[in-house]
Structures are given as C-alpha cells and as structure tokens.
Amino acid sequence: MAIIYVSALRGARFPLFTNNPHPFPQLPIPSRRSSKLNFRSRGFTLFARYAQSQQDPFSSRLQDGIENFPKLVDDIVQTSINTGPRGPLRLAQGIQAFLGVGGEWLADASKIVVSFIGYFYGVAVPLDGYWNNIIVIVKERSTNSSSGLPTQMRLGLLSPQYLRRLFERMGATYIKLGQFIASAPTLFPTEYVQEFQNCFDRAPEVPFQQIQAILREELGRPIESVYEYVDPTPVASASIAQANTLLPFPVHAARLKGSQEDVVIKVLKPGIKDILVADLNFVYIVARILEFLNPELSRASLVGIVKDIRESMLEEVDFYKEAANIEAFRSYLEAMGLTRQATAPKVYQHCSTQRILTMERLYGVPLTDLDSISSLVSSPETSLITALNVWFGSLLACETFHADVHAGNLWLLRDGRIGFLDFGIVGRISPKTWTAMEVFLASIATEEYVSMASALTEMGATNKDVDVMAFAKDLEKIFSSIQDLDTELIVATARDTTTNATAVSANVVVNERQMNALFLDVVS
C-alpha cells in the first residue's frame, strides 16, 4: 500500500447544527396505536434535577429517605407475597449452589497451593491440563513480577469461570443473564464475555415423555389427532436459535396432520414461570434496597432496568402474547407491502396455548453465516439493508417492534426473504413519545431549547419534577459548547499498487481539554 495524500483542516468549527427549519422529515404517527402502548426509556434517563429552592443536601437526602422508607417496606412485603412459597425454596437452592461452587473453588485453590509449595521444594504434584497451565502462569509471575495469583484465584467466585458455574447451577434465569453477558462485549470485560459463551450450550434437555405429557394436557386431545409426528429430538440451536432465546425452551420439529405442513413446537418447561418470578423478584428487592441506601444509583435507573427485565422475561413465558406479537408483525408486513422482502412464522392458533406455540417452520441461515448467505443471494449487503429497513419501519408502523434482533433471530431464507424469529421480547413506543421525539428533532435544528427541554421531559428522559426553563438554559450551554469545539479533520487516501484501488478515510480530532470540560458540565 502506498500513501498518496494526507491533508488536515485545522481550527475548523464543528458544524453539528444548522438553522435549517426543516432538516428532518415529519414522522408519521400510526393512528391505530392504542394508548396502552408505552416506551420504556428508563435506561436513558438523564435524571436532571432543577429545584425551585435551595436546601441542604444532607437534610434533603435524610428527608427523602424518611419519606421513601415506608414505600420501600411496603414494596418488599408486596413483592415477597407475590413470590409465594417458591421464594424460600429458591433461596435454599441459591445457598446450595453457592456452597457447591465455593467448594469447587476451595478444592482447586488447594491444588494450586500444594503444587506451588511442591514447586519450591522440588516435588512434582500431578494436575490436570487446565490447572497445570495455571501453575505455569503462577510460576512465571512469581519469577518475573509481583502481580500475584491469576484472576481465577484472586477473584474467587467472582472470577469468570466460577461465576459462570454458579449461574449454571442456579438455573434458567441466571443462564439467560450469562447469555446476556456473552452477548454484550461493550459492557463487560473480554474474559467474562468469552467464558459466558458456554452458557449458550447449557440449556438442559427435557425428557420427551414430559414434552408429550405437556402437549396432551394443553391440547386436550391425543397428540396423534393434531400432529402427523413429533420429532423426539429437540431442534438444534443452529436451526431454530433455541440457545439464543431468552429462556431455554424445548423446540421440537413436527408435521401437522391433514395439511402435512412442517412446523415447530415451542414448549414451556414445567415450573419455569414460578422460578422466574422468585428469581426476578429477589433481584428487584436487592435493587430497591441498593437504590434506597445509595440514591446516586438512581442515576443509572437500576430499579427501572430490573423492572423492565422482569416484565420482559415474564412476558416471554406467555405464548399467547408471543403469538399476538407475531401476528402484529405479519399484519405490518402485509399492510406495507413487504411480504416479498420479509416474513415471520405463521402461528397455528388451533394447536397453540399459553404453554405451547406451534409455528410454521422456516428454512434458512443466520445473517452472520456469510458463506451460506453468498450461496443464496448475490448481494449479502442488500439482504442486510433490507432487514434493517424492515425493522426500522416496524418502529413506526407496527404496534410492537422486535426487541431481540440478533443472528439467531434474523435469518436469510431459502427464497431470499428475511425471516424474523422469536417475538418473545418486543418493544412499544407510544404516540406521545413519537410526538415528543418529533418536537425534539425539530428543536435541535431550530435551536429552540425550551421546546427541546419540554420534549425530553415528555419522553420521560428526566425526573418528573423539573424546572423546564432551567433545564433549557443548561441544554443551551451544552449545545453551545459542542458548537464551539475546536476540531481537526484529517483526511487520508491510500492506493493499492496491485489492484490500483483507492481508499479514503477521514477522522475528526477534537480538542481534549474542551471535551473534558464539556463532560464535566454534563456531569455537574
């Protein structure tokens, strides 16, 4: 590669915002949305406070604590009552899991200590391959540095390996949390993300006899009267994204009697809802107590996030709701004329209940399987763009939008269409929020900060008690600081001498001192 040209534009102003009164198109608000739809924005809450009067911070916090304590106690009592007898049982199971994994850590740690002592005295102590590697690391560190024991020993049960083992022992809820960690490399350290990849392979199998019993109970008639056959072996995760669903639901291939259509049956494991309620209520109580003891945690909306997770996971164990979500998405595709570009599995209502969901079987490959995609279509990029356009369109024109879009739930089908799978987790945006968002976007272009502050308040991006005028002044200060940033635009081109192709790249460098000052203004 030969560098052909590099140029820098120094001292340029950052033209983020203009005075163009109509830079954004008007967003249509579907009239068929019901008022019950809501947009959960707690994770993006600014929590700006603009008090009308000054008060001592300690006295204010003490007064808030006294006022909120009865609410906390009442919330804990009500949540415990709703949990029922499953709560103490799950607590006992949690203690047992903790002690079990703790015993494993102590046993492994003792091996390390014995082998390490033997190393100094010249006595060989046999270990398995994994722990032998740990010993090698310890020896190297003891010789070359003073960094001490490796992470697995220093962090104990909080280390990636032992924490993953603990989650697996705790069951479905915690396996899903492990899957979430594995799917969020931007939020968690690399070693945790890599270790928790193993959670995708830890969905415990349910005996087929138990599956048959559930089918007979839910259908209310013999299985043979509904299905030509049901495959006793669960569908592989690579084919139906079983391991990527929110919970490890058993999924079995089948064929309908009469129509001979290929279907898949998603089955709710016995007792999973009670376990979920107990686990998530426990996590909710812990979050409430932590936020009460440290009100600063409210800035992260810890309780709000836990409540959203709890509601989403409990919704996914109600297949009536998932079926309704699928039908809403299919109606959106038909209304927008997108049935040739995308689809979702058809739901067979006559053999679906709250605990079993019978759906059309789709054949295809995940969008991340580039080799297989290339064999189906000539332009994989076009397929990805189509998937994104269909999904973004559902934000505006569908009652709900798919909120769990990942490789396992987004397929390229054999006929070239995009297949959307697993509608257990969906999002909802209310017309009120969309209207406020329109006002917010327009106010950015026109620099009307009072409207901007009011729109953010309407969207739920602040606390309820906010001085809008004071909030608007702070927004004006922040946006003015952004516009005044000293920037450096660096443009570089390079040419490949073999193919004669030219590549162009550009980077914007911002004055670090000004950026730090801006961050401090935002935080304060």
Image (cartoon, rainbow, N blue to C red):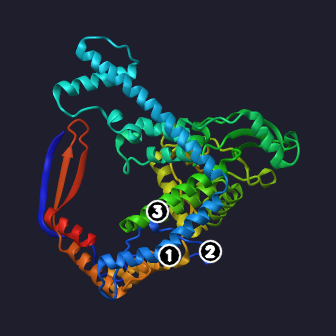
Residue 245 location in percent, x, y? Answer: 58, 47
Query: Label 3 to label 1, Cα distance in Å?
Result: 34 Å
Q: Amino acid at mark 3?
A: Ile
Q: Can see residue 384? A: yes
Residue 52, located in which quarter of the rendered image?
bottom left
From the image, tell me which residue sits under label 1: 434
In the rendered structure, the answer to whether residue 221 lies left or right of residue 298 reads right
Looking at marks 1 and 2 on the same chain, the residue that comes earlier in the sequence is marked by 2
Residue 448 visible from this viewpoint: no
Residue under numbered circle 3? 289
State the residue at coordinates (58%, 69%).
397
Q: Quadrant of residue 241?
A: top right
How far apart in space, not on screen, are marks 3 and 2 (Cα)? 30 Å
Mark in front: 1 vs 2: 2
Compare residues 465 and 342 and report the one nearer the observer: 465
Q: Which residue is drawn at the image coordinates 41% and 18% (left, top)?
A: 128
Q: Is 183 or 93 nearer to us in this picture?
A: 93
Q: What kind of residue is marked 1?
A: Trp
Residue type for callout 2: Lys
Query: Residue 36, labelled with which disc?
Result: 2
In the figure, residue 203 lies in which quadrant? top right
Element under label 2? loop
State the image coordinates of residue 88 (x, y, percent, origin top left): 61, 50
